[in-house]
Image (spheres, rainbow, N blue to C red):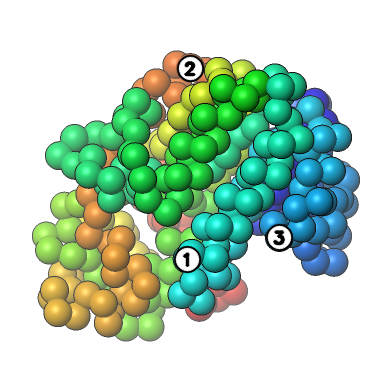
């Protein structure tokens, strides 16, 4: 297939692109900068210059492709405190690409997150692919992509674990938690730290995107989950050991100050199953789990100091 990939030079895209190429696909990657374009060219991909606001470029690339993998998101707007702009930009980008694919039967693979299940009221049990949340900022985009199946597009959405980890991860939740622990001198958790986060290795997630592109049924929700639920305290303890700082529960009144923008997420209990995903597209994670990956030490190298 000729595959158009947004976010192709980012954390997950940098694993998706070589996985697609190794499987014999052609890749066209969206690049908004010279550095991104150079990285894609070096990897063996073609380059489509543009960004999520350049809707004509997105439509053009989608129309010329046999399938689309949508990884990009305006994280800068999110971190700048403007989530509405980020969500609206994502929705318009999806609509533009979908318009070019409508009625073709071609695949469109979108991206969501398992934390949306926890915030959507799925608590006290493992979230599954069958769980649907009716509304919420990125949930609406997820539901829109799933609904594209009714418009003649073989659409699917991958709900990624909050921690997608590997040596390719320089700005996600794992390095952010490490940076907080390094700067504060404490590897913290909330309450007794028994709340659980799922995780997946970047390269396992990349393979799932390819399998979804190749074989996911129209309207599928898939879970990019290898570790179905790692206790947050265990994550903090692994970080504390590597940094040689104490691990401790952060008092409720100090959580926001300690964790900054992550304060809204660190207490979430988000155990999540990927049983259906594994059966549906024959996906089996093979890379190290989160705690083993943290123990390898690459997250703690000097180059990653935040």
Residue found at x 75% / y 53%: 55
Q: Which residue is mark 2?
A: 280
Can residue 212 be seen by looking at this rendering? Answer: no
Residue found at x 82% / y 42%: 61
Q: Nearer the viewer, residue 33 or 173?
A: 33
Please state the horizontal and vertical placement of residue 291, each as a whole percent of the image.
Answer: 36, 50
Distance CA(mark 1)–CA(mark 3): 15 Å
Please state the horizontal and vertical placement of residue 301, each as a whole percent of the image.
Answer: 53, 70
Q: Nearer the viewer, residue 184 or 242?
A: 184
Name the front one of labels 2 and 1: 1
For mark 1, does the 10 Å Cα neighbourhood hold few (<14), some (14 to 19), or many (20 or more) residues? Answer: some
Q: Which residue is mark 3?
A: 53
Left or right: 267, with 146 as reference point: left
Q: Secondary structure at mark 3?
A: loop
Distance CA(mark 3)–CA(mark 2): 34 Å
Q: Which residue is mark 1?
A: 83
Q: Nearer the viewer, residue 234 or 149?
A: 149
For mark 2, does the 10 Å Cα neighbourhood hold few (<14), some (14 to 19), or many (20 or more) residues? Answer: some
Marker disc for residue 177: none
Q: Are marks 1 and 3 in contact (CB under 8 Å)?
A: no
């Amino acid at each position: 297939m000729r595959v158009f990939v947004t976010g192709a030079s980012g954390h997950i895209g940098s694993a998706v692109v070589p996985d697609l190429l190794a499987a014999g696909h052609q890749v066209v990657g969206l690049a908004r900068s010279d550095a991104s374009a150079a990285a894609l060219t070096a990897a063996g991909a073609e380059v489509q210059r543009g960004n999520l606001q350049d809707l004509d470029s997105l439509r053009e690339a989608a129309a010329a492709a046999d399938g689309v993998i949508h990884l990009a998101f305006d994280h800068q707007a999110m971190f700048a405190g403007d989530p509405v702009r980020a969500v609206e930009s994502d929705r318009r980008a999806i609509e533009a690409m979908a318009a070019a694919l409508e009625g073709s039967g071609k695949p469109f693979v979108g991206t969501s997150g398992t934390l949306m299940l926890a915030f959507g009221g799925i608590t006290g049990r493992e979230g599954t692919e069958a769980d649907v949340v009716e509304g919420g900022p990125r949930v609406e985009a997820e539901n829109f992509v799933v609904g594209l199946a009714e418009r003649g597009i073989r659409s699917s959405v991958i709900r990624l674990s909050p921690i997608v980890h590997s040596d390719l991860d320089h700005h996600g939740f794992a390095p952010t938690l490490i940076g907080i622990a390094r700067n504060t001198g404490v590897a913290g958790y909330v309450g007794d730290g028994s709340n659980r986060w799922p995780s997946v290795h970047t390269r396992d997630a990349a393979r799932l995107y390819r399998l979804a592109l190749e074989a996911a049924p129209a309207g599928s929700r898939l879970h990019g989950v290898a570790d179905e639920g790692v206790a947050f305290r265990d994550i903090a303890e692994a970080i504390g050991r590597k940094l040689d700082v104490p691990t401790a529960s952060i008092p409720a009144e100090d959580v926001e100050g300690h964790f900054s923008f992550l304060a809204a997420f660190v207490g979430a209990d988000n155990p999540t199953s990927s049983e259906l995903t594994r059966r549906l597209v024959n996906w089996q994670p093979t890379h190290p789990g989160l705690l083993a990956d943290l123990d390898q030490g690459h997250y703690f190298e000097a180059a990653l100091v935040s």
